[in-house]
Amino acid sequence: MRKKKAIFFAAIGIVLVVGVLALLKVLQIRAMIDQGKKFVPPPETVTTARATSQQWETSLTAVGSLSAVQGVTVSAELAGKVVEIAFHSGATVRKGDALLLQDTSTEEAQLPGSQAQTELTRLVLERDAKLLPKKIVSQNDYDTAAANHMQARSQENNIRATIGKKTIRAPFSGRLGIRQVNVGQMLREGDPIVTLQSLDPIYADFTLPQQELGRLHQGLPVRVTCDALPGVTVNGRVTAINPIIDADTRNVKLQATLENPGERLRPGLFVNVAVGLPTRRQVLVIPTTSVLYAPYGDSIFVVLDDPNKKGGKVLRQQFVRLGEKRGDYVAVVSGLKGDEEVVSTGAFKLKNGGAVVVDNRLSPSFSMTPKPENN
């Protein structure tokens, strides 16, 4: 009986100990929760910029591609064997430079005989010309001598032309592509040898909707950007407008001429084109780094005075609709008022209602025409 009482009291003691431990743990967890609710994270340090109003020229945007002012695949005019290649792939050549020589041994062997025949017919013609007034030769004999001389000259010139055509020369100045022939190779008429492109200046070909035709004319400024040259804008002018509207797309084709002194732009490159119009419009701009891009919408963080803390700053996340980008700036179509202060860097680490400290000592400089080394 005593043994059963001892076991009973021991069980009660264990239950009491477990209950006390559980109560202590519950109190600890509640204290941690209360402490977490009262915890205020330290303010984030950010840089800011003011939303400013600027005048931007109105522009029409399009996508296009580049093409050479002059571009051709140099080919063989006549069949023959390659005996010498006088160029290197990718080299710059001038108009008239020899590129390739074909075998002309047969023509050169025929040329002296043709020259001798030309000289002989010339002498016969000169002799008949002296004898014709004296009626020693007939008019028919003189005409035959003249025809024979012309035929001999034609044959000689034909041989010389064949020799000349077997020396392939650059038709204009430009940059060569990759060589497509080898020494000793037999070329047929029209076989490609190498591409030749004139790269400075260069054309940008693009299309715009037909409803914009009334605002277009030659001489309008053009700005071209591409992924191959990030941060670089190439300027040019509209130099041609196709007089025919495409019946399938109802678009008009335009061509702009761009300066390309460093030959950084190449034919076939995909580009973004902006055609500047004379009219200008007022836009509200902020740095592009202020925007937090997301699938559900783009947003920015506006910096406001904290009503609960004197001198403090808090954030308000604001969704905005964006417009055109130029340089380091982007136009805000709606969602923001002028002169509001927005976070310019580090938006990805912020949250709505968070406290911040503004420190613009490390703020990057923003420009409408940034240089690549600053991006």
Image (spheres, rainbow, N blue to C red):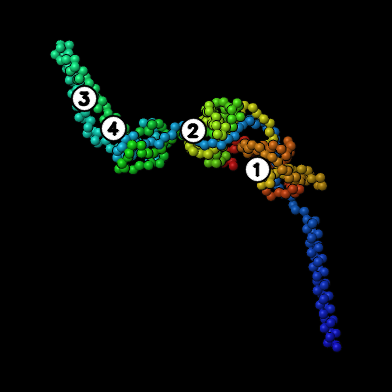
Q: Amino acid at mark 1?
A: Thr
The residue beneath circle 2 is 202
Of the numbered discs 4 and 3, the one sitting upstream in the chain is: 3
The residue beneath circle 1 is 289
* Along the line of sight, the residue nearer the viewer: 111 or 280: 111
Does residue 124 appear left or right of residue 77 in this picture?
left
The residue beneath circle 3 is 118
The quarter of the picture where the N terminus appears is bottom right
Residue 123's image quarter?
top left
Query: Mark 2 falls on what kind of element?
Result: strand
* Mark nearer the viewer, 2 or 3: 3
| Whole-percent x, y for residue 124 in the image | 17, 20
Residue 203 in view here: yes
Task: For the residues labelled 3 and 1, say whether their Cβ atoms are less than 8 Å apart.
Answer: no
Kindly report the distance in space between the C-alpha atoms of the residues bearing marks 4 and 3. Answer: 18 Å
Q: Amino acid at mark 4?
A: Ile
Q: Amino acid at mark 3?
A: Thr
* Along the line of sight, the residue nearer the viewer: 54 or 166: 166
Query: Mark 1 falls on what kind of element?
Result: helix
Residue 63's image quarter?
top right
Of the numbered discs 4 and 1, the one sitting upstream in the chain is: 4
Residue 286 in view here: no
* Mark nearer the viewer, 2 or 4: 4
